[in-house]
Amino acid sequence: MKRSVVPDTNSDFGRYGPPTLLRSLISFAQNCPHNWLGQQLAQIVRKLVLWAGPLPIDVTVGPVKMRCYLRDNSAEKKFVFMPWRYDRRERQLLLEALPRNGVFVDIGANVGIYTLVVATHLSSQGRILALEPNPPAFERLCFNLRATRSGRSEWPAIDALRVAVADDTREVYLHLDREDLGCSSIAPRAAALASKDSAAQAEVVRVSCKPLLALLKERSIPRVDALKIDIEGAEDLALVPYLREAADDALPKTIVIENSEHRWKLDLVGALADRGYAARMRSRMNTVYRRHGG
């Protein structure tokens, strides 16, 4: 079984720059044609780098800088080699919903891909709340934020918190997934599905959990323009109380939600409809909801 690598978050970005050949291969993959052939070529490059390359590697994807470990995080693998394919439309719709001084909330930020893309879009008047309870993912998120910010004249205010989001304030068990850092979850069913290995199922950490409205109030964030949530089946616990209680003028115009309806116990789709949201776009992985009049 794979184990998440203890991240090096102390050395400067560039310490793990890939050799010239691997850097050229990664650049080739990132610039492949946006079609089936390009996808096949990019996947071949990804396999070569994972097989031959030293890890971690420090890579640049557009304006985003990341220290990537790749083998334990599918989101990294997809974004680094095929940024033109990984959640491309979802990211576009989020940026369209965010003015330069906008407010973005990223629930389940992982190592920060969405947060980093949005941060490079916002001005110094913008605001981001990035929430990630998984300890190694959170450390990597913070490193990637520092690396991407370096040398930029404009940067939004960002609160990165190692906290889970659910329906009340308590401590919860975060069930870790050794194969994929982004698949860890506070939802028990997701953990049971993660592995048949009883030892893997027992690998948990206790994390703090708070409702979204409480977190927004603590950070003096009166409104949200756009929100993304990917917390492996616990999206209903995080969003239904928020949608029931938030003021109309505080609700985000656009919400990106991972397609986990089969795991939800609460009627999240109904709660969205009650507050005026309708599905704007659905991909294999996510659904983008847009609020009427937003």
Image (tube, helix red, strand yellow):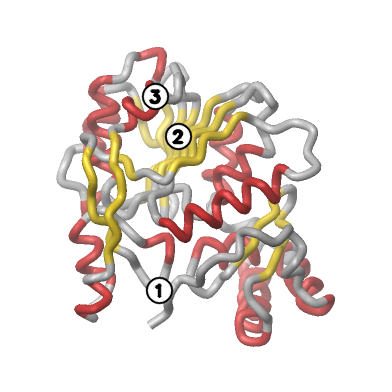
What residue lies at 38% left-to-right and 36% top-to-bottom?
279
Q: How far apart, in angstroms, are the residues tagged by discs 1 and 3?
A: 34 Å
Q: Are marks 3 and 2 in contact (CB under 8 Å)?
A: no
Q: In the current view of this chain or complex, which residue is farthest to the right? A: 20
Q: Is residue 56 above or below residue 110?
A: below
Circle number at residue 179: 1
User: Would residue 61 appear left or right of 265 to someone viewing this image?
Assistant: right
Circle number at residue 143: none
Q: How far apart, in angstroms, are the residues tagged by discs 3 and 2?
A: 18 Å
Dot 1: what SS? loop
Q: In the current view of this chain or complex, which residue is farthest to the left? A: 265
| Circle nearer the N terminus (1, 2) | 1
The crowd level at tag 1 (other Cα within 10 Å; few <14, some 14-19, many 20+) is: some
Q: Amino acid at mark 3?
A: Glu
Q: How far apart, in angstroms, are the residues tagged by discs 1 and 2?
A: 27 Å
- Of badges 1 and 3, the one in the foreground is 3
Q: Pick whichever, 277 or 100, lies toward us.
A: 100
Q: Position of residue 156 (x, y in %)?
A: 64, 30
What residue lies at 17% left-to-right and 40% top-to-bottom?
266
User: Would residue 150 appear left or right of 231 to someone viewing this image?
Assistant: right
Q: Pick whichever, 166 or 224, lies toward us.
A: 166
Q: Is residue 24 above or below residue 147?
A: below
Dot 3: what SS? helix
Find disc 2 in the rendering and name its residue.
227
Q: Position of residue 50 (x, y in %)?
A: 61, 80
Q: Amino acid at mark 1?
A: Glu
Find disc 3 in the rendering and name its residue.
218
What residue lies at 32% left-to-right and 26% top-to-bottom?
214
- Of badges 3 and 2, the one in the foreground is 3
